[in-house]
Image (tube, rainbow, N blue to C red):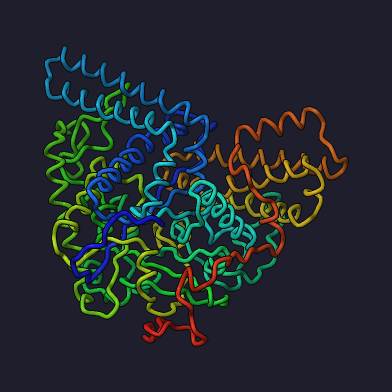
């Protein structure tokens, strides 16, 4: 890696690592507005391009940022899709025209301030359009540049954000990860060292029962011993991932990010627990224990809960401050926002006008406050032989899209830590692991960062029906992948590849999330059903091919239509779904990727008592 940023001469006593999780479900060729391509356009204009501008500013000024940025594989596939590249400038042009129309309306109405805000939106979307043209439509290449110089570390995710604890076969878990690694390597030019396990979901090794029967009325198969998520990651040479607080603390569970978004407020007891939490539990990485090859042990970083509240909570966190741009109130038909939050739970009709300069000043004070919180969390470990590290993971789309000033806030934090001797340095997880040992091994329970801390968001009475289709689809895919027939002709390989694509899209955890939260239930149910229908169509093509070695003309035409509609993962390998398939990827010597672990399982500096 080319490192252009100089190490600080200040003494580092603790570290802050941001992790931004950039992901959207596959929406290309699946609707436009209000759900569909509009999501991707909004995220690109309001989060991804502004984040690239922040990174450009920091690179120009030689300031460290070193965050972990997950660009999910399915997001990467969409950002380079010809449909997105063609449609995004049209979207930006519509926003520019709408801003001009708003300006004319406000001038005629005699509202000079809102007319100036309309000009603000004109400049904002014109800059986005100019940036996109300057990049020649290649947003990924710019992120790759910042990854190459070490300003960020781009990590991966499940291929389609499949929720690993509930997938029905070990092969499906491995295939989500291996497809992700292959996709990431194709786009970023190097193997990812870390992963965002979708929804921070984790399941240890052990006996597992199918939670539901199958859609055709047949009972679920017998339970069986499953591998742990850590083993599947280790086999793909993934060095680290992230887990929620309660998987490490095992004490009183604090509200999850999604509960905070829905208005939950921590109790006094929970706030006290977070304030006095032992720095040796949350502010250090651990090897994950389990029945797998410990020479290639995978590491976890726990999520810090107290700092998370400041960004996730729309009520008590920074985004709820009255001077910031309100997310909900928009002027139609253009959809531009002209009003500020104003106050907690203020009715939309009572929102007051937004003033960008006032908001940018508030960003600076909130950045200073966040740095203070990090300092308070880490200071008890400042004199430890191994400096503590605070891990702050967030959805990337929170910054810029949901919280318009969020990107400026990230930049302000980097500048604050650069300008003042706080003893805290920003770092990536890989950089920290290359410098310091883990704290030992930890045996984790299963769980997630979703509401309730378990699988409830993705498996509940509203979503159970989806798994009655997913599980038999996974088993059928494993069956055909385990045979050699798909390798016998290009037609067989085409059918098998599309079957695997439809399965991956069917497994996306976004569908259950959108149903459970009610954010876009109809769209999610329709999308799941369409991928299930297409899976079954391709399954019927396979059976025809199996019987005759060919397809009818109408079937081949329909296969081409499905391939065009869901043209993701061009190098997808059906062999990843074969029974017992695993790829011990450890191509690099262990000492070049992680510290060698002696026979007793501990690095010489890790002779602390392992966490039970």
On the picture, is 5 further left or further right than 505? left
Seen from the viewer's position, the closer of residues 489 and 190 is 190
- Of residues 545 and 584, the one nearer the viewer is 584
| Residue 191 at x, y percent in the picture | 51, 57
Residue 578 appears in the picture as rendered? yes
Residue found at x 47% / y 61%: 193
- Corner quadrant of residue 181: bottom right
- Residue occupying image coordinates x 14% and y 32%: 352
Q: Residue 64 vs residue 80: left or right?
A: left
Q: Is residue 138 left or right of residue 528?
A: left
In percent of width and height, residue 50 lies at 30, 39
Vertical order, 160 against 135 (above or below): below
Q: Is residue 406 visible?
A: no
Quadrant showing the C terminus: bottom left
Name the residue rendered at 33%, 53% in the picture.
151
Question: How many numbered marks, from 0 up?
Answer: 0
In this view, 599 is above or below 123: below
* Outermost residue to the top: 108
- Quarter that holds the N terminus: bottom left
Q: Residue 358 placed where, x, y %?
A: 11, 39
Tell me residue 24's x, y (percent). Answer: 45, 43
- Toward the right, the furthest residue is 548
Residue 140 appears in which quarter of the rendering? top left
- Comparing 506 with 417, the one in front is 417
In the image, is 15 to the left or to the right of 289?
A: left
Residue 445's place in the image compared with 492, above or below, is: below
Q: Residue at x 32, y 37 (%)?
A: 46
């Amino acid at each position: 890696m080319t490192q252009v940023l100089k190490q600080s001469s200040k003494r580092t006593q603790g570290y802050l690592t941001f992790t931004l999780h950039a992901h959207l479900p596959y929406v290309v060729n699946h609707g436009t507005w209000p759900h569909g391509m509009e999501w991707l356009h909004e995220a690109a204009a309001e989060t991804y391009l502004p984040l690239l501008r922040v990174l450009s500013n920091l690179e120009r000024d030689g300031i460290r940022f070193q965050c972990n940025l997950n660009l999910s594989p399915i997001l990467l596939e969409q950002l380079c899709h010809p449909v997105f590249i063609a449609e995004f400038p049209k979207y930006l042009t519509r926003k520019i025209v709408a801003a001009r129309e708003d300006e004319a309306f406000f001038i005629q109405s005699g509202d000079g301030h809102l007319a100036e805000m309309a000009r603000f939106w004109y400049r904002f979307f014109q800059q986005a359009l100019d940036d996109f043209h300057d990049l020649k439509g290649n947003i990924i290449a710019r992120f790759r540049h910042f990854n190459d110089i070490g300003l960020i570390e781009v990590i991966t995710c499940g291929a389609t954000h499949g929720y690993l604890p509930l997938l029905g076969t070990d092969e499906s878990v491995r295939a989500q990860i291996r497809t992700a690694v292959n996709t990431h390597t194709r786009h970023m030019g190097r193997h990812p060292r870390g992963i965002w396990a979708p929804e921070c979901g984790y399941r240890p090794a052990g006996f597992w029962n199918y939670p539901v029967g199958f859609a055709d009325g047949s009972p679920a198969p017998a339970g069986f011993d499953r591998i742990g998520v850590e083993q599947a990651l280790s086999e793909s040479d993934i060095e680290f991932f992230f887990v929620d607080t309660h998987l490490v603390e095992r004490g009183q569970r604090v509200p999850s990010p999604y509960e905070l978004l829905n208005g939950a407020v921590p109790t006094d007891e929970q706030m006290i627990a977070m304030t006095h939490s032992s720095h040796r539990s949350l502010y250090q990485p651990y090897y994950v224990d389990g029945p797998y090859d410990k020479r290639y042990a995978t590491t976890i970083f726990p999520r810090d809960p107290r700092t998370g509240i400041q960004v996730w909570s729309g009520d008590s966190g920074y985004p709820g401050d009255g001077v910031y741009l309100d997310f909900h109130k928009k002027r139609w038909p253009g959809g531009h926002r002209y009003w500020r939050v104003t106050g907690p739970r203020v009715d939309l009709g009572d929102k007051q006008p937004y003033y960008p300069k006032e908001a940018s000043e508030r960003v600076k004070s909130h950045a200073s406050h966040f740095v203070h919180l990090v300092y308070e969390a880490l200071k008890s470990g400042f004199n430890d032989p191994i400096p503590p590290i605070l891990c702050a993971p967030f959805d990337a789309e929170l910054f810029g899209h949901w919280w318009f000033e969020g990107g400026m806030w990230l930049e302000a934090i980097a500048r604050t830590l650069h300008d003042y001797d706080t003893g805290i340095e920003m770092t990536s997880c890989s950089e920290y692991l290359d410098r310091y040992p883990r704290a030992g091994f930890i045996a984790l329970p299963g769980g997630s960062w979703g509401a309730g801390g378990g699988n409830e968001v993705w498996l509940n009475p509203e979503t159970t029906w989806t798994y009655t289709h997913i599980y038999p689809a996974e088993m059928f895919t494993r069956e055909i992948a385990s045979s050699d027939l798909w390798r016998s002709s290009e037609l067989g390989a085409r059918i098998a590849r599309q079957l695997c694509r439809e399965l991956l899209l069917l497994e996306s955890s976004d569908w259950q999330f959108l149903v459970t939260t009610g954010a876009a239930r109809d769209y999610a149910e329709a999308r799941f059903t369409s991928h299930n229908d297409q899976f079954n169509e391709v399954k019927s093509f396979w059976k025809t091919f199996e019987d005759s070695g060919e397809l009818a003309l109408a079937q081949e035409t329909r296969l081409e239509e499905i391939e065009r509609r869901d043209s993701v993962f061009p190098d997808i390998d059906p062999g990843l779904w074969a029974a017992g398939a695993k790829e011990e990827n450890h191509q690099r010597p262990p000492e070049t990727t992680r510290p060698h672990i002696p026979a007793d399982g501990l690095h010489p500096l890790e002779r602390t008592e392992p966490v039970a």
